[in-house]
Image (cartoon, helix red, strand yellow):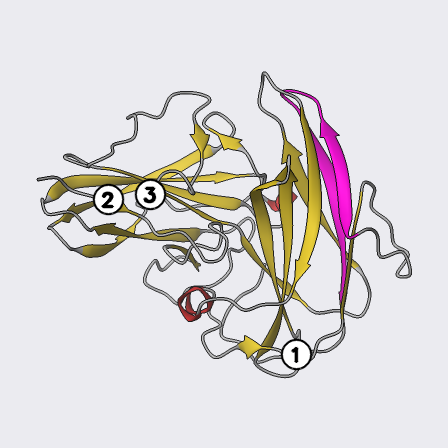
Amino acid sequence: MSAHLIIEDGQPWWWDSADIWVVPGNDPNGPPGAPVAGSSNYLWGRVHNTGNSASNGVRVDFYWADPSGLIAVGAATAIGSAFADLAPGATQEVLCLVPWFPVIVNGGHECLLAVAHGAGDINPLPDPLPNGFLFQPQQHEQIAQRNVQVVQAARRAQMLSITVAALARQARKVELHLEQGGELAPRLLATLGLGKWQPAKETAVSAGLSREPHCNDDAAGEQKLLLEVPRGQAVGAYLSLRADKLPPYQYALLRVLERQDGKVLGGITYLIVSSEDGREEQTS
């Protein structure tokens, strides 16, 4: 008999996890939403025990990192931990005991990670995680990732920064690729304060990738961008994003996928909403 700890991944891409969410402000029991840079935010996680044995004293560690396909221990910054006792078949929402203050440099947008450690887990992770250990949610059920950003639609192009990093001992050749359309799970939308929103039936989203920022609305950039990243370093890229006005309570979806040797290693999901909606959520 053993416990089986899981923090669920997102679908179709693991970084869309609804088992990690943010409550901006000073009240951890307030409504969920997008993080606010430079201010207090609280992190919540949802952990499951699908095994046939209890796991008491489960610890869920929370981290933030610059968004990148490969994130390793040492590159991610620990925020704090939450704790739970999980009976067989139990699910529990847990609160990180330390508030999170997103850095203003990234406009409040960072990748969030949650990692569960617990006694009797059927496939336990090293505890503590060794330096250089790769956070790979698609390979470890106890790890989940949230890399979703809410963006307000604007007719003038917005320049959003993207970071692609390489590990200390290996250079990388990476292709960034744009993917438009689709919809998010209702549970994920609810954690953004967007529970009423539906995917837009018709949208006019113009997006492109470039190595340098630009302010020319006519220069949308490329749909695919090849980057060479020296070992142990990070390379920046830019997403130019422009969207016409969206109908109330509708959103458009855009993802930047990071591929290496044809395999998707990670990505960022951008949820585009109208700047004129009377929303209950806060956007980053």
Q: Find disc 3 in the rendering and name its residue.
A: 141
Name the residue at 44% across, 37% down.
136
CB atoms of marks 1 and 3 within 8 Å: no
Q: Secondary structure at mark 2?
A: strand
Q: Find disc 1 in the rendering and name its residue.
A: 276
Q: Secondary structure at mark 1?
A: loop
Residue farthest front in this picture: 262
Name the residue at 65% across, 75% down.
274
Callout 2 crowding tier (Cα within 10 Å): few <14, some 14–19, many ≥20: many
Name the residue at 47% across, 33% down.
77
The magenta-colored residue range is 223-242
User: Which SS type dominates the magenta stretch?
Assistant: strand
Q: Mark 1 vs mark 2: which is more N-terminal?
A: 2
Q: Find disc 2 in the rendering and name its residue.
A: 5
Callout 3 crowding tier (Cα within 10 Å): few <14, some 14–19, many ≥20: some
Numbered disc in front, either 1 or 2: 2
Question: For the residues marked 1 and 3, what is the alpha-carbon distance in whole angstroms?
Answer: 39 Å
Report the amino acid beneath label 3: Glu
The N terminus is located in which quarter? top left
> Which of 84/48 is in front?
48
The image shows residue 118, relative to residue 220, as above or below, that is: above
Q: How many marks?
A: 3
Q: Quadrant of residue 142?
A: top left
Question: For the residues marked 1 and 2, what is the alpha-carbon distance in whole angstroms?
Answer: 41 Å
Apparent side of residue 114 relative to residue 33 in the rendered image (left or right): left
CB atoms of marks 1 and 2 within 8 Å: no
CB atoms of marks 2 and 3 within 8 Å: yes
Report the amino acid beneath label 2: Leu
> Which of 74/107 is in front?
74
Residue farthest top in this picture: 169
